[in-house]
Amino acid sequence: MFIFYLKPTVMNKYITEFIGTFFLVMAVGMASTMGAMAPVAIGATLMVMIYAGGHISGAHYNPAVTLAVMLRGRISMNEALPYMLVQVAGAAVAALICSQVLEIKGAGDCAVAEGNTIKALVGEILGTFALAYVVLNVATSKANSGNSYFGLAIGFTVTAMAYTFGGFSGGAFNPAVAIGQSVAGNFCWANIWIYLVGCFGGAALAAVVFNVNNPNDK
């Protein structure tokens, strides 16, 4: 019954976050069969979904980005938590459709090779830091308000970071993506902490750096 008491504008934000995260995670799952071109498909999907939903919800599609935007001061905790829940729900649904209905399976090797835990953690921290740092600067900064390149910049950041760190961790840079990949069986649940700690840690660090560099951008 809770859903019927939400304001239409709030509900539209949740719908947008669900759809954007759904297609992002669907792209991640489907691209697992594309080899070296997978990061391009994933980054392009994120880019177009950002352009599609940015004016409605801000187009986070990533609990770590939502955390960074909250720490930056653009949304409250009461707004951030439902965003995160909806993003995870969209990711889980996409993963189930991809793995169970379309029967797309990845290598099933957990993405993190034995002995590469620290490398994977560092990769997720740095990759998510770069993503959140770009998001905050191109999509929330007053100096860049109204620009037309924000989606392109964010999408290319994901592509670049996937090529840079994907070999260590699978290149999630997004807790919802990591959960989706775990639901689909492409990541191991035993490694989920790497993505939670790495992604949220990298995003929080990006928010701190943004606030230090932009003390008057409140």
Image: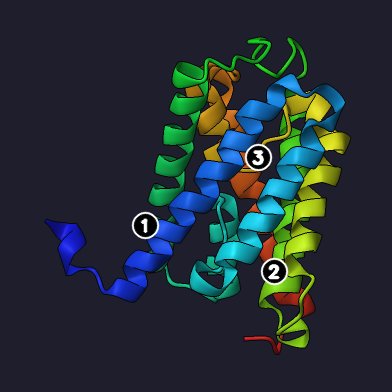
What amino acid is labelled 3 in the image? Answer: Gly
Q: Nearer the viewer, mark 3 or mark 2?
A: 2
Residue visible at 70% across and 28% down in the picture: 31
Residue 136 bears which disc, if any? 2
Occupied quadrant, residue 204: bottom right
- Spot the residue most to the bottom: 216
* Residue for badge 1: 82
Can the viewer see residue 184?
yes
- From the image, which quarter does the N terminus lie in? bottom left
Counting residues from the N terminus, which is met first, the one under dot 3 or under dot 1?
1
**Residue type at the position of mark 1:** Pro
**Residue 100 placement, left or right of 122:** left
**Residue drawn at (49%, 68%) of the image:** 57
Picture quarter containing residue 187?
Answer: top right
The Cα atoms of the two marked residues, 3 and 1, are separated by 21 Å
Q: Earlier in the sequence, mark 3 or mark 2?
A: 2
The front one of 150 and 124 is: 150
Q: Verify CB contact (< 8 Å) between mark 3 and mark 1.
A: no
Q: Position of residue 21 (x, y in %)?
A: 53, 47
Q: Position of residue 173 (x, y in %)?
A: 68, 42
* Residue in the image at 43% along x and 72% along y: 76
**Quarter of the picture holding the C terminus:** bottom right
Per the image, label 2 sits on a secondary structure element best described as helix
Amino acid found under the numbered disc labelled 2? Leu
Residue 5 placed where, x, y %? 17, 68
Please name the residue that numbered disc 3 is placed on. Answer: 198
The type of colouring in the image is: rainbow
Of pointers 1 and 2, the one earlier in the residue sequence:
1
The answer to whether 14 appears left or right of 117 in the picture is left
Q: Classify mark 3: helix, strand or loop.
A: helix
